[in-house]
C-alpha cells in the first residue's frame, strides 16, 4: 500500500458533539438542531479513527440536518496521529507539490516505512474482523427509535466499507438481517477489489476520487466507471477532483486554497447526495 494512506493534515477546531456507547462501541454523536433521526449518517473512519477532522466533518453534516454517528470500529486500535504529525519528515507523505521535491533517499525511507507500519495493522483489522463490527453497528442504529433511512460515508480504509454497505441487505447463517444502508458515499476508498466490491452494489452510491490518488489509478477508476455505467437501475455518481491525492476529502490542507476548495466541494457532494436519497 502507498504512503498516501498515512498522508494529510490534522485540522483545528472544537467538535460540538458528545461520546456515547452504541451497539457496544464508543461512538461520537453529532445531532441536528431538531434532533431528528429521520436522516441518519454513519461515518466509517479512516486508519486514524476518531480524531478531530472526522468529528468536525460530522458536525457540518449535523448542521445540514443529519443525525451523525462515528463508531470506533477499530476499538481503540486506530493508527496514532503521530504518523500525520511527525517532525522528521513533517508527515509520512507531504502534499503533492512537496512530495515531488523529495529526494530519492527520502522516498526510499517512506517506501520502507509504510509496509512495516500498515501490514500488521491491516491484518489485525481485516475484512473478516471489521465487516461484522460495522454490520452490527448498522443493525444497532436501525433499532434506535426514530431512525428512518441510514446512509454510510467512508474515507480511505472506511471508503471500501461504505461500498460494501451499498450491497444491500442480506442474511447471516441464523437468518438475521445483516447491516447495509439506504445510500452510501465513498471518498477515496482504498484496498478495493475490482470488480468484486462493485458488482454487488444495489443501493444509491456516490464516489469522490482524486486524480492523483496513488491507491486508485486511472485504469482502476476507468474500470469502476465501466462497472457502474452498466448499473442503469442504481443511482450513482463518480466525481473526479483534479490534482487531489488520497485522503483529500478528510485530511486536505486547509492552508491551500485549492485543497480547501476540494474538501468543501466533497462535503457538499455528500450532503446533496444524502439529501436526495435519505429523504
Image (cartoon, rainbow, N blue to C red):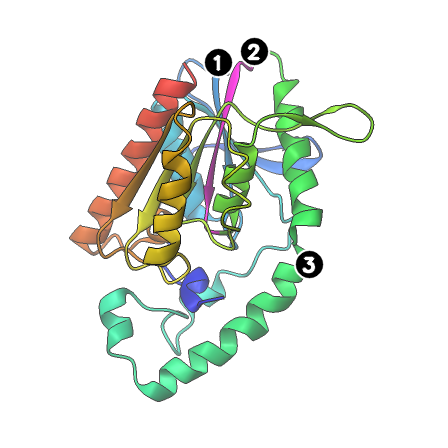
Query: Which residue is painted at 39% across and 75% down in the image?
Result: 87
Q: What residue would you read off at disc 2?
A: 146
Range of residues picked out in magenta: 147-156
Query: Number of labelled discs?
Result: 3
Rendered position, 164 above or below 7: above
Circle 3 — which element? helix
Circle 1 — which element? loop
Rendered position, 116 above or below 163: below
In this rendering, position of residue 240 left or right of residue 278: left
In the rendering, which numbered label is found on residue 187? Answer: none
In this rendering, position of residue 3 left or right of residue 78: left
| Chain-order first, disc 2 or disc 3 | 3
* Rendered location of residue 106, percent (x, y): 37, 83
Nearest the eye: 137 or 160: 160
* Rendered location of residue 220, percent (x, y): 39, 54
Cα–Cα gap, marks 1 and 3: 35 Å
Q: What residue would you read off at disc 1?
A: 38
Rendered position, 142 above or below 255: above
Give the overall secondary structure of the magenta segment.
strand
Instruction: Tell us which disc is closer to us: 1 or 3.
Output: 3
| Label 2–label 1 contact, CB within 8 A | yes
Q: What residue would you read off at disc 3?
A: 124
How packed mark 2 is, by other alpha carbons closer than 10 Å (few <14, some 14-19, many 20 or more), is some
Query: Which residue is painted at 44% across and 40% down in the image?
Result: 55
Where residue 271 sits, quadrant-wise, is top left
| Chain-order first, disc 1 or disc 3 | 1
In this rendering, position of residue 262 left or right of residue 63: left
Amino acid at each position: 500500500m502507498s504512503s498516501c494512506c498515512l498522508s494529510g493534515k490534522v485540522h483545528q477546531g472544537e467538535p460540538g458533539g458528545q461520546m456515547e456507547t452504541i451497539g457496544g462501541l464508543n461512538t461520537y454523536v453529532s445531532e441536528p438542531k431538531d434532533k431528528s433521526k429521520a436522516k441518519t449518517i454513519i461515518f466509517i473512519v479512516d486508519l486514524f479513527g476518531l480524531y478531530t477532522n472526522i468529528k468536525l466533518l460530522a458536525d457540518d453534516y449535523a448542521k445540514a440536518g443529519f443525525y451523525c454517528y462515528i463508531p470506533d470500529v477499530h476499538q481503540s486500535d486506530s493508527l496514532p496521529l503521530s504518523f500525520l504529525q511527525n517532525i522528521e519528515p513533517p508527515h509520512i507523505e507531504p502534499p503533492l507539490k512537496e512530495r515531488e521535491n523529495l529526494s530519492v533517499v527520502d522516498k526510499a525511507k517512506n517506501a520502507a516505512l509504510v509496509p512495516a507500519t500498515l501490514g500488521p495493522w491491516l491484518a489485525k483489522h481485516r475484512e473478516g474482523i471489521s465487516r461484522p463490527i460495522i454490520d452490527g453497528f448498522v443493525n444497532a442504529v436501525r433499532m434506535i427509535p426514530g431512525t428512518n433511512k441510514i446512509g454510510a460515508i467512508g474515507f480511505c480504509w472506511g471508503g471500501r466499507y461504505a461500498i460494501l454497505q451499498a450491497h444491500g441487505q442480506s442474511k447471516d447463517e441464523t437468518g438475521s438481517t445483516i447491516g447495509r444502508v439506504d445510500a452510501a458515499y465513498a471518498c477515496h476508498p482504498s484496498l478495493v477489489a475490482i470488480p468484486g466490491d462493485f458488482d454487488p452494489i444495489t443501493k444509491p452510491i456516490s464516489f469522490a476520487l482524486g486524480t492523483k490518488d496513488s491507491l486508485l489509478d486511472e485504469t482502476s477508476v476507468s474500470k469502476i466507471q465501466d462497472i457502474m455505467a452498466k448499473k442503469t437501475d442504481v443511482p450513482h455518481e463518480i466525481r473526479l477532483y483534479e490534482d487531489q491525492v488520497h485522503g483529500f476529502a478528510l485530511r486536505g490542507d486547509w492552508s491551500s486554497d485549492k485543497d480547501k476548495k476540494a474538501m468543501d466541494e466533497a462535503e457538499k457532494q455528500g450532503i446533496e447526495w444524502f439529501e436526495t436519497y435519505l429523504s
